[in-house]
Image (cartoon, rainbow, N blue to C red):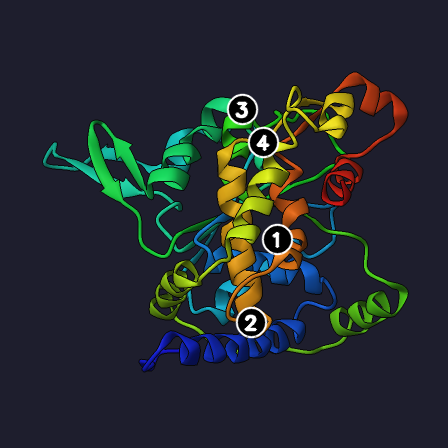
Amino acid sequence: MSRTFSNDVEAADALAAQYRELKREIAQVVVGQEDVVRLVLTAIFCQGHSLLVGVPGLAKTLLVQTIANALELQFKRVQFTPDLMPSDIVGAETLDKERNFHFVKGPIFANIVLADEINRTPPKTQAALLEAMQEYAVTISGQRYVLPRPFFVLATQNPIEQEGTYPLPEAQLDRFMFNILLNYPSYDQEVSIVKNTTADLTGGVRKILSGEDIAHIQHLVRRVPVADNVVEYAVRLTHFTRPGTEGSAVANEYLEWGAGPRASQFLVLGAKCNALINGKYSPDIEDVQAIAKPVLRHRIIRNFKAEADGVTVDDIINKLMNS
């Protein structure tokens, strides 16, 4: 992707080929989780952030680090704990021997920042990421510092251990393009994982794309043409998540709160990228549906009836897509 292309069609073909190569390289280290890899790469190509939710031991950290290596990006990991302070993330001003203040950059000054177990730290520290995720900059003592580009936050959460955790506020959840669920590996995949991790094997991944390549891809994704009916479907899908909307029986029955306009934007943007990596030059409704669940599942809130009836968020999204 480092070379220039005469037109967007040629660049799109190259991206599809590079995506297949990326998947092969990542699969050498991370067994399974193909859908998760697709969604994380889609978010990166769309200049979005992702929340990865899964039980311990599903290789969330390994996955993020492997993707960072394959993309030749600077990677920093922050372990979120109850005593973590905002300055531990963004940095702080320190006094030197000459009594001058100097800003010492925190780990957020990287291309990919892994916020490990983000819900284990109090809201004050969680909020330190808000400006960085939206503005790609941080403000310290009135001074604004621009973050390196490309910049992505990939945060992890443990869905089963809730003691001592602080749920992310909806304003911060909305900053994440995707909420990606990681499932247990299949039997055959787990056999491969055990064989690979209990043997004396060393290996890594080749560098497939650079930061400059990713910047070009992000611009390419935004230039992808979209038919009006696809945009209208994405907006209608978001619109029907809002209770009180005429014709949305699903939302009126099961939802307390619906998704905002950012969901429509991410549905269209994600559909564009999903089309490109699958060798298409323009998205269709199936591309919107392919990324609908990770876009919507953290932006809608179930009501008491849905919880009492055992209707999950993904069940509701399926009903909305089929209505």
Residue 98 as seen in the image, left or right of residue 295: left
Percent x, y of residue 311: 84, 31
Looking at the rendered structure, the secondary structure element under dot 2 is loop
Q: CA distance from mark 4 to mark 2?
A: 28 Å
Q: Amino acid at mark 3?
A: Pro
Tell me which corner region of the image, top left, top right, bottom left or bottom right, holds residue 127: top left
Q: What's the distance in space between the residues labelled 1 and 4, CA to CA?
A: 15 Å
Contact between labelled residues 3 and 2, with CB atoms less than 8 Å apart: no
Task: Identify the mark at residue 280; answer none if there is no mark.
Answer: 2
Can residue 79 be seen at all in this image of the molecule?
A: no
Q: Nearer the viewer, residue 271 or 55?
A: 271
Q: Quickly name the residue at label 1.
A: 288
Label 1, secondary structure: give it: helix
Task: Identify the residue shown where x is 60% and y is 36%.
Answer: 238
Q: Amino acid at mark 1?
A: Val
Frontmost of labels 4 and 2 is 2
Badge 3 or badge 1: first in the primary sequence: 3
The residue labelled by disc 3 is: 122
Q: Position of residue 269 (x, y in %)?
A: 49, 53
Question: Which amino acid type is marked by label 4?
Answer: Ala
- Whether pointer 3 and pointer 1 mark residues with C-beta atoms closer than 8 Å, the reply is no
Instruction: Tell me the crowding category of disc 1: few under 14, some 14 to 19, or many 20 or more residues within 10 angstroms, Cα based.
Output: many
